[in-house]
Amino acid sequence: MMQEKVFPLLNECNFASVKPIMMELPYPSIQVREKNQSHAELLSIDYCGSVSEMSAITQYINNENHLSLEKCSAAKTILGIAMAEMIHLQKLGQLILLLGGSVDFVARYRDGRQKMWTPQYLRFTENPREMMLGGIEDEKAAIEQYSIHMKRINDDGVNAILARIIKDEEYHIMLLQALANEV
């Protein structure tokens, strides 16, 4: 008789029903007034700089992996937030390309510096509360950076998308604060 294989270690957290966690508001059309390299460069920082959607996605996925074994509900929320950040990344990429920029994971700064995205931008912890508090800090930094960039970008189409992304980031702060109190 053949013995059934037993797997003593198992992650039973099921992510099948997880959807992006974002405000239930439509996104404006992806449109720009005209090609503008300096606007594209500002958005490249939001796309893949140290404070960026790329950093947020990677940070949240890392945190979700650590949480999924013992805090499945929190892990699902974090994955939903990561999925929203993926949508932000996609929208920024579309704007960058419309503006005539390049989507290559290189942040382009005003002083001419260029820096490729790196996991060195991430914070590594296994403490769930530290994860949530770090996420809150990161979301606040993203909102501040988007606000600064909106003042420098004189394109209503671009700024409408950035303003809509900020609404999601504010919502994420609220969720992360609730999770920080739970874990």
Image (spheres, helix red, strand yellow):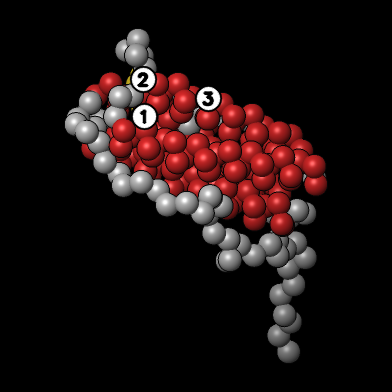
Which mark, by number, is residue 43? 1
Tags 2 and 1 touching, CB below 8 Å: no
Vertical placement of 93 versus 41: above or below? Answer: below
CA gap, disc 2 to disc 1? 11 Å
Vertical placement of 172 versus 143: above or below? Answer: below
CA gap, disc 2 to disc 3? 13 Å
Q: Is residue 84 visible?
A: yes
Tags 3 and 1 touching, CB below 8 Å: no
Question: Which one is closest to the eye, mark 2 or mark 1?
Answer: 2
Question: Which one is closest to the eye, mark 3 or mark 1?
Answer: 3
Q: Is residue 59 visible?
A: no
Secondary structure of the residue carrying numbered label 1: helix
Amino acid marked by disc 2: Arg
Residue 180 lies left or right of residue 26; in this view the side is right
Residue 100 lies left or right of residue 95; in this view the side is left
Tell me how many marks there are. Answer: 3
Residue 51 lies left or right of residue 33; in this view the side is right
Q: Residues within 10 Å of mark 1 (few under 14, many from 20)?
A: many
Of 168 and 73, nearer the camera is 168
Residue 158 percent coordinates (x, y): 33, 34
Of 147 and 138, nearer the camera is 147
Residue 11 percent coordinates (x, y): 70, 61
Residue 41 percent coordinates (x, y): 32, 24
Which mark, by number, is residue 152? 2
Which mark, by number, is residue 144? 3
Residue 60 percent coordinates (x, y): 59, 43
Q: Residues within 10 Å of mark 3 (few under 14, many from 20)?
A: some
Residue at 58%, 38% (x, y): give it.
Answer: 170
Q: Residues within 10 Å of mark 2 (few under 14, many from 20)?
A: few
Q: Quadrant of the C terminus?
A: top right
CA gap, disc 3 to disc 1? 14 Å
